[in-house]
């Protein structure tokens, strides 16, 4: 299996399965002599972990990182950073009844057809359990870029048809973590939570949108023609489980406007009066805030009875057991932030290659 590595200079390679012994990874290309706060990594893991509220899966994983290499006395050595997180709360028997059945909208069918084998225990490698590694690497990246005053935050902006009708410029960042859905508007958050609880009681699931904002990005990040900054951010977001859409800047709404309405005009301060471009022009950051939306589908695992086929191509009824999220959004917020951090740090390091001989 390929495709387990992300990045150009700052690279993360991950391993492990949902119901295996552990998940972990190797970070290559991390600069040396940088102080890393392990408590901050664990804090990010706590934002992603299971069992944190009534609207997520009740699986209980402490998700404590164990550093294997590359960090000495909380300082990066410049060598590969190895880390591992052990799986503890495993109930693989919950999946025995689907050992030979393909779950609707899961990777079961495609994995089996491609590899002639699949890990039926919670989806194995295709499980969102893998995102633990992304959050760890992303937390390290976030700590590094923060030294350059680059700040990244994400929040839930819609659940189903319940939408936060506020620009990212008008929200209060400090309010994001004040409720279990991670929506910065408490009134809208209550409606979202109530909606998810209703869906959960029905044995169903629901999706929505996460908005992400990147502040204080320097001018010049991005590698045209094929490695544009927004294309790399898009790749990063679309690689997350359950993501079905990505748009940055004005996105699809921009198709309804004229060029005269949409163009971002530069002023004497080398800033744009508007930011419909989303902080990126020609694939290169222009110094304005980068903002984008990530669309998550409803979680595929539901408790309602459905139809599928088994390995013998026979039609069967399927009712999935186990512990699952009715809505992935609150736990996906730190994952979105992590992937954005990986992209920005990677492109920041790549951009500095041009400055070596200056």
Image (cartoon, rainbow, N blue to C red):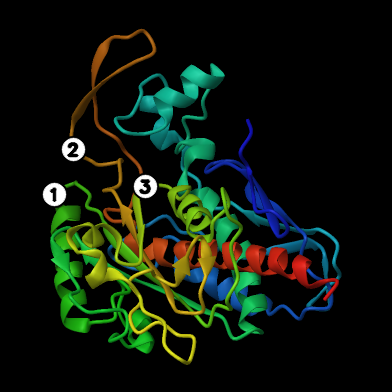
**Within-10-Å neighbours for mark 3: few <14, some 14–19, many 20+:** many
Q: State the residue position of label 2.
A: 304
Q: Is residue 135 above or below residue 32?
A: above
Q: State the residue position of label 3.
A: 242
Rendered residue at 29%/81% (across/down): 184
Q: State the residue position of label 1.
A: 202
Rendered residue at 47%/17% (across/down): 113
Asked if the residues shown at circle 1 and circle 2 are in contact, with their CB atoms under 8 angstroms apart, the answer is yes
Asked if the residues shown at circle 3 and circle 2 are in contact, with their CB atoms under 8 angstroms apart, the answer is no
Towards the viewer: 146 or 97: 146
Element type at mark 3: loop
Q: Earlier in the sequence, mark 3 or mark 1?
A: 1
Residue extending farthest bottom: 269
Element type at mark 2: loop
**From the viewer's perspective, is 160 left or right of 252?**
left
Towards the viewer: 187 or 3: 3
**From the viewer's perspective, is 331 left or right of 282?**
left
**From the viewer's perspective, is 218 left or right of 209?**
right
- Residue 51 in view (yes/no): no
Residue 264, horizontal then vertical, whole percent: 35, 75
Measured Cα–Cα span from mark 3 to mark 1: 20 Å
Measured Cα–Cα span from mark 1 to mark 2: 8 Å
Which disc number belongs to residue 192? none
């Amino acid at each position: 299996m390929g495709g387990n590595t992300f990045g150009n200079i700052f690279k993360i390679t991950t391993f492990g399965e949902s119901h295996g012994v552990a998940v972990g990874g190797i970070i290559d290309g991390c600069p040396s002599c940088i102080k890393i706060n392990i408590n901050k990594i664990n804090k990010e893991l706590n934002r992603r972990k299971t069992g944190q509220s009534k609207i997520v899966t009740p699986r209980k994983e402490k998700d404590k990182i164990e550093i294997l290499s590359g960090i000495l006395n909380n300082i990066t050595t410049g060598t590969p950073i190895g880390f591992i997180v052990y799986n503890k709360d495993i109930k693989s028997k919950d999946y025995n009844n689907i050992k030979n059945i393909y779950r609707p909208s899961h990777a079961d069918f495609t994995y089996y057809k491609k590899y002639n084998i699949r890990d039926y225990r919670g989806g194995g490698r295709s499980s969102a359990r893998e995102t633990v590694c992304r959050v760890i690497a992303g937390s390290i990246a976030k700590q590094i870029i923060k030294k350059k005053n680059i700040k990244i935050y994400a929040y839930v902006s819609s659940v189903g048809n319940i939408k936060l009708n506020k620009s990212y410029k008008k929200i209060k960042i400090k309010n994001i973590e004040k409720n279990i859905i991670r929506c910065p508007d408490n009134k809208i958050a209550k409606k979202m939570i109530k909606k998810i609880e209703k869906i959960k009681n029905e044995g169903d699931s629901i999706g929505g949108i996460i908005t992400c904002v990147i502040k204080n990005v320097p001018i010049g990040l991005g590698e045209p023609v094929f490695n544009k900054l927004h294309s790399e951010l898009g790749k990063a977001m679309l690689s997350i489980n359950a993501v079905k859409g990505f748009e940055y800047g004005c996105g699809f709404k921009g198709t309804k406007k004229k060029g005269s309405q949409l163009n971002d005009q530069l002023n004497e301060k080398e800033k744009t009066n508007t930011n419909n471009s989303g902080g990126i022009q020609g694939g290169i950051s222009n110094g304005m805030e980068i903002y984008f939306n990530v669309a998550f589908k409803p979680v595929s695992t539901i408790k309602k009875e459905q139809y599928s086929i088994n390995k013998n191509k026979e039609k069967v009824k399927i009712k999935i057991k186990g512990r699952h999220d009715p809505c992935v959004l609150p736990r996906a917020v730190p994952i979105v932030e992590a992937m954005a951090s990986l992209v920005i740090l990677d492109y920041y390091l790549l951009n500095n290659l041009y400055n070596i001989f200056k």
